[in-house]
């Protein structure tokens, strides 16, 4: 039974990792089209580093994900605090809008934002992408922070208030320090969502600011070159490092 | 930030109101306007767009999307359930490592993986080379640009979305409950059918939703891997906005899709109303 | 100095359509250790939160130190709370926790550190100032929570079931410490508890709360010995409630029939023949004899022992009377009766010291 289980798990992992592995291996293959091994080369990495368009789009993606994750986490911590601590008009609506945002298909979010930006005559580019990415990351960040915050003893906030703390003090001195791990997970999740997104970006991006997934997408149509393999391999390495680091952080606790 | 309360409430309202509520209303508005000749839309209220949704051509696309999404969901569930169950039952150290292995494909942009699948299933790709080389087949398989390639691409990209909610649920399964079942004389299958599956139902349904809905809308997967036979709802909507420039019609399709999604989720909540709703999302 | 530090006038509190407190009036004397005692759900925690300002009443007035604070937020009332869960800030050291409330007042640095030292001294935690809450025992955490509230120099310290998370022995020690702390500081402590033993042990003044109303307020002894009504009698200590019929009543005495026997008792509350009453007798006021110990069975109820529970210094008995009523009796080991030796189904005779009973109106509870 144990052997069957191990085999099954390995097979699923093989399915999940085969494409990634293929990319990594062929990024070192000394051939342009062939699917057979023609010897080891780092040629495609040199090509990649001279292909400013592809490389720049990868840089854009990382920058975008970084900014979107930071801003979304910051806003999410404020929104989660409002939802957790205060009674106000339309609180249910805010709550429901967050759920709607999670439930709404990405395709519809992309379209909705496209309509918004075009009715505002906002040119599609870096700003529209950043606003869109913050918006799609926000509900997940809010939920991550909110659900951890509800695990905190609500007496903590009451006792802080009882001791004379203002709302700002409670947010800065009690909530934020206690929610550090939640903020980190929210940031990582937002970073992943932003980096992963294709559909929303597809609608709200413009030629002035190309990002990696869309760049690759357009290249798959005109014929692919092995430097994409090299770029994907580098991105995979980065993801490995981030996931590994976050595991280490978790273990250190 | 003298008054944090006012600040936080205003910020919540501003962002969600401006980027979610207002544009959603704009979408609904667009869906009842007409296509313009020179501009994107013409202010001429009509329900024609919605009536057009029921044109057989589009209903056909919708039905095909439903069928594909359904198959993708079922296959994903059958692959993911035993997988998540096995991982959830491994000792914690190994479990964390396996979970980490799961997270990496989840984090990888699906354009990259879709592209990788394309390389593998190409006529002169890795799969054919391997099978020909091993003598299993004598003619290369024409997988790329067939529905099969789309199935593979969708299942690959959506499998993690099935695994993670299932795992989250199965991990919470109390060993003592299983031991109690065993003690009362249940065998392996009885434990599975009577205890494990019913107790993980919210995870199963959540996973199915996370797979089913995107499966209908991930337009780039059929675009890259499929041919004309895999034109799905997502592609139809995308084309209205980017190729045909018929925004009102595209908007009406989007509204219809959203209502469909909301109905599914409502059904899910309705059927699970005894459980805590916050836990479901 | 005012006589009453906290006054609640006509307070009502409603949650949704559930009424928690109705038109409650309560005055708490300055400098006392007052305990609000009641079963869970009686509204006692709500009462405390109204005094602290964490909740607002729907109706009524709250006066602290002669000043109307009904609409003031917690930080503007000179009142601080020790929460049931202690609510220590887990990311701050003991000293930082205590300093927090003072920093919120923007006091000068040296004033803060002086007050923190004072507070640490009061609770004997000087050595633990740099520890985090999780590095402390439950009792120590409790003391930090108290020190944190005391550092604010409140007029009134509110304690919400502060000892409920501690084990039995620690609870006893903390009861003593709280009481002596209150005596030393001279400020008013208002403690909320459901534990009547705790209330009796610590308080100068007990407020019995039930169904959102004050049932009785007074010193522990009065509450125990002279319960004002059936609510109080049933809540404080074990009691035997005997159905009683008045056969005759005058200003001095009532003649009553209890369990088929006739008694002439003092009429302290002016009962008339028309009143429906109960007789309440504490288990420790009942005497249980076997036939050989007594000369006459005059005025005694007869029954058999159905349960014997040995408690160390006492023996608790359950006696089923011939009339079918079950009584609980507590017998003390003393020199007259060094070996209390009861066995099951033994036939016994039960009486009480006349005058130790309490006659109360029969109320539907």
Image (spheres, grey):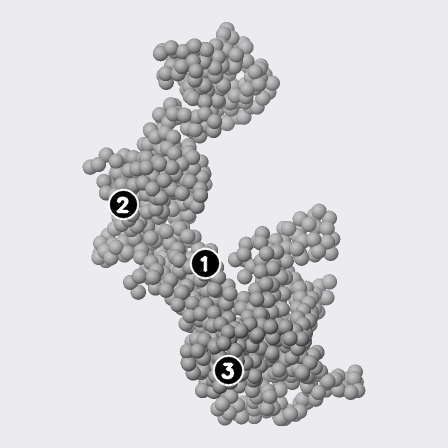
Judging by the rendered image, the residue that carries numbered circle 3 is B36
Instruction: Give the quadrant of residue C335.
Output: top left
| Residue closer to the observer: C277 or C263 | C277
Q: Which quadrant holds the N terminus of chain B?
A: bottom left
| Label 3, residues with CA under 10 Å away: few <14, some 14-19, many ≥20 | some
| Label 2, residues with CA under 10 Å away: few <14, some 14-19, many ≥20 | some
Q: Is residue B239 left or right of residue B12?
A: right
Chain under numbered label 3: B
Q: Residue at x 43, y 17 (%)?
A: C275
Q: Secondary structure at mark 3?
A: loop
Judging by the rendered image, the residue that carries numbered circle 1 is A92
| Label 1, residues with CA under 10 Å away: few <14, some 14-19, many ≥20 | few
Q: Is residue B173 above or below residue C199?
A: below
Instruction: Give the quadrant of residue B117.
Output: bottom right
Q: Is residue C64 left or right of residue C17?
A: left
CB within 8 Å, label 2 to label 3? no
Residue B25 in sight from this viewpoint = yes
Judging by the rendered image, the residue that carries numbered circle 2 is C69
Q: Is residue B180 above or below residue B149?
A: above
Q: Where does residue A19 sit, x and y in percent of width and height?
A: 63, 80
């Amino acid at each position: 039974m144990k052997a069957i289980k191990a085999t099954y798990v390995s097979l699923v992992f093989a399915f999940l990792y085969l494409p990634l592995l293929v990319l990594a291996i062929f990024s070192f293959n000394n051939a342009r089209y062939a699917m057979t091994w023609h010897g080891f080369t780092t040629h495609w990495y040199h090509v990649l580093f001279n292909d400013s368009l592809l490389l720049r789009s990868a840089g854009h993606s990382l920058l975008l994900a970084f900014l979107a994750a930071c801003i979304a986490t910051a806003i999410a911590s404020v929104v989660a605090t409002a939802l957790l601590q205060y009674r106000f008009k339309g609180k249910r609506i805010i709550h429901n809008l967050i759920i709607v945002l999670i439930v709404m298909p990405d395709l519809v979010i992309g379209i909705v934002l496209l309509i918004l930006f075009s009715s505002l005559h906002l040119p599609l580019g870096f700003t529209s992408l950043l606003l869109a990415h913050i918006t799609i990351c926000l509900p997940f960040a809010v939920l991550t922070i909110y659900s951890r915050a509800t695990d905190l003893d609500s007496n903590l906030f009451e006792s802080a208030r009882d001791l004379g703390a203002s709302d700002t003090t409670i947010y800065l001195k009690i909530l934020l320090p206690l929610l550090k791990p939640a903020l980190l997970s929210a940031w990582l999740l937002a970073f992943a969502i932003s980096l992963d997104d294709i559909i929303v970006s597809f609608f709200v991006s413009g030629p002035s600011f190309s990002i990696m997934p869309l760049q690759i997408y357009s290249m798959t149509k005109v014929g692919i070159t092995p430097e994409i393999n090299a770029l994907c391999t580098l991105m995979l390495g980065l993801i490995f490092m981030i996931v590994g680091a976050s595991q280490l952080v978790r273990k250190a606790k | 930030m003298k008054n944090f309360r006012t600040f936080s409430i205003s910020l919540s309202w501003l962002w969600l109101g401006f980027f979610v509520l207002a544009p959603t209303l704009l979408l609904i508005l667009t869906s009842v306007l007409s296509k313009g000749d020179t501009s994107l839309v013409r202010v001429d209220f009509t329900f024609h767009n919605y009536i057009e949704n029921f044109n057989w051509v589009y209903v056909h696309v919708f039905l095909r999307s439903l069928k594909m999404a359904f198959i993708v969901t079922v296959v994903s569930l059958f692959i993911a359930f035993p997988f998540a169950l096995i991982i959830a039952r491994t000792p914690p150290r190994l479990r964390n490592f396996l979970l980490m292995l799961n997270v990496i494909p989840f984090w990888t942009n699906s354009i990259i993986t879709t592209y990788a699948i394309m390389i593998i299933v190409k006529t002169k790709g890795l799969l054919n080379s391997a099978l020909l080389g091993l003598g299993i087949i004598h003619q290369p398989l024409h997988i790329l640009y067939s529905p099969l390639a789309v199935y593979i691409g969708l299942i690959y990209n959506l499998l993690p979305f099935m695994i993670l909610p299932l795992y989250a649920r199965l991990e919470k399964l109390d060993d003592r409950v299983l031991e109690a079942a065993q003690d009362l004389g249940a065998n392996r299958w009885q434990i599975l059918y009577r205890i494990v599956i019913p107790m993980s139902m919210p995870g199963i349904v959540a996973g199915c939703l996370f797979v089913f809905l995107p499966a209908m809308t991930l337009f780039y997967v059929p675009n890259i891997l499929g041919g004309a036979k895999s034109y799905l709802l997502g592609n139809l909507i995308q084309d209205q906005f980017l190729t045909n420039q018929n925004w009102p019609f595209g908007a009406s399709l989007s509204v219809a899709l959203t209502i469909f999604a909301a109905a599914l989720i409502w059904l899910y909540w309705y059927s699970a109303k005894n459980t805590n709703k916050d836990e479901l999302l | 100095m005012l006589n009453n530090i906290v006054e609640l006038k006509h307070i009502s509190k409603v949650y949704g359509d559930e009424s928690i407190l109705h038109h409650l009036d309560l005055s708490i004397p300055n400098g006392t250790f007052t305990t609000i005692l009641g079963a869970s759900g009686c509204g006692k925690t709500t009462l405390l939160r109204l005094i602290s300002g964490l909740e607002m009443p729907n109706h009524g007035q709250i006066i602290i130190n002669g000043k109307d604070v009904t609409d003031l937020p917690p930080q503007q009332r000179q009142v601080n709370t020790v929460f049931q869960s202690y609510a220590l800030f887990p990311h701050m050291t003991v000293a930082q926790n205590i300093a927090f409330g003072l920093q919120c007042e923007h006091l000068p640095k040296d004033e803060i550190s002086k007050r923190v030292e004072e507070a640490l001294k009061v609770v004997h935690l000087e050595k633990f100032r740099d520890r985090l809450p999780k590095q402390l025992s439950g009792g120590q955490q409790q003391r930090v929570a108290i020190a944190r509230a005391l550092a604010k120099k409140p007029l009134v310290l509110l304690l919400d079931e502060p000892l409920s998370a501690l084990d039995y022995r620690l609870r006893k020690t903390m009861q003593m410490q709280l009481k002596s702390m209150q005596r030393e500081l001279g400020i008013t402590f208002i403690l909320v508890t459901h534990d009547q033993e705790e209330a009796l042990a610590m308080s100068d003044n007990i407020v019995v709360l039930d169904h959102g109303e004050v049932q009785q307020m007074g010193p522990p002894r009065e509450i125990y010995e002279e319960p004002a009504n059936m609510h109080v009698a049933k809540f404080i200590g074990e009691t035997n409630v005997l159905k009683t019929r008045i056969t005759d009543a005058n200003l001095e005495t009532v003649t009553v029939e209890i369990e088929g026997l006739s008694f002439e008792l003092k009429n302290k509350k002016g009962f008339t023949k028309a009143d429906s009453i109960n007789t309440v007798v504490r288990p420790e006021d009942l005497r249980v004899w076997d036939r050989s110990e007594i000369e006459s069975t005059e005025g005694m109820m007869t029954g058999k022992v159905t349960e014997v529970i040995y408690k160390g210094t006492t023996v608790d008995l359950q006696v089923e009377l011939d009339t079918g009523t079950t009584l609980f009796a507590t017998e003390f080991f003393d020199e007259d009766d060094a070996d209390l030796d009861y066995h099951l189904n033994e036939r016994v005779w039960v009486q009480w010291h006349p005058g130790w009973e309490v006659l109360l109106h029969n109320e539907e509870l």
